[in-house]
Structure formats: structure tokens, C-alpha cells
Image (tube, helix red, strand yellow):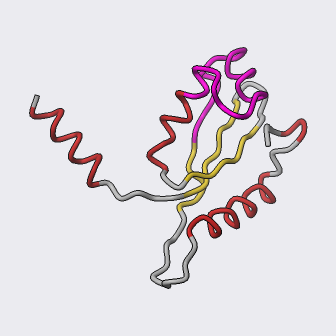
Amino acid sequence: MDRKKELKQLYKETPVEAGIYLIKNTENGKLFVGSTRNLKTLNGVKFTLENGGHTNKGLVQDWKEYGKDAFTFEVLEVLKKKEDPYFNEKEELGKLEEKWLTEMQPFGERGYN
């Protein structure tokens, strides 16, 4: 029981980081680039895919067809927060996502975006 408490405390102490992630279908090579204000929520993304609740229906369809083992998750970049009082995390995360969408080009036959 103590181990469970330790793990819970460790989870709470882990800093919340925003960033950009990549989901790759290893069977057909298609990519999905996404962003989140909390990278700890990637397990939640997997959960929504498992249950068909993800907003990207093409990705959900392929998840069902190929199975979860055909997909990899990778953090592409963690958003560097600035001490500037005018720093807008949501806005900066959007810019970072656009950068990765431009670089990875996960559109049409290449991806799910």
C-alpha cells in the first residue's frame, strides 16, 4: 500500500509540461501531430482511442483496424515556458504545433491531420 502512495505522490510532484506529440501508425506510416497542455494526459489519448471517443475518426478507425500495438507515441517537443508575465501558453503551444505540422506534413495520405 505504501508503494501506491509513493507513486501517487511522485505523479503529483511531476511538473505539468505542455508539448507536441506524435502518434505513428507503424503499419501504414500515417502520422498524427497533436498538442496538449499536459503531456501526462497522453494515456488519456490512448484511452479515447481505445473507446472510439477520439475526435479524429480516421485515426479511431485505423486504431480499431490495426490494433493498439500498431501505434507508437512520441513527444516531439516540450514547450519552454517563459517568465514573461505576458507569456500565453495556449498561443505559444499553437505556434509550436503549427511548426511541427509544417515539418511533418501529416495530411492526406501521409496522416490524420
Image location (x, y in percent) of residue 111: 81, 39
Identified at 28% across, 50% down, the residue is 12
Residue found farthest to the top? 65
Residue sitting nearer the eye, 90 or 11: 90
Residue sitting nearer the eye, 12 or 78: 12
Q: Give the mark count.
A: 0
Q: Is residue 36 above or below residue 51?
A: below
User: The magenta stretch spans which residues?
Assistant: 48-73
Identified at 51% across, 40% down, the residue is 42
- For the stretch drawn in magenta, the main secondary structure is helix
Q: Is residue 57 magenta?
A: yes
- In the picture, the quarter occupied by the N terminus is top left
Q: Is residue 22 above or below residue 97?
A: above
Q: 82 left or right of 8?
A: right
Q: Is residue 45 above or below residue 20?
A: above
Q: 107 left or right of 101?
A: right
Residue found farthest to the left? 2
Identified at 72% across, 58% down, the residue is 100
- In the picture, the quarter occupied by the C terminus is top right
Image location (x, y in percent) of residue 88: 58, 73
Image location (x, y in percent) of residue 58: 79, 28
Q: Dividing the picture into quarters, in which one does residue 109 lie?
A: top right
Image location (x, y in percent) of residue 81: 49, 73
Identified at 85% across, 39% down, the residue is 110
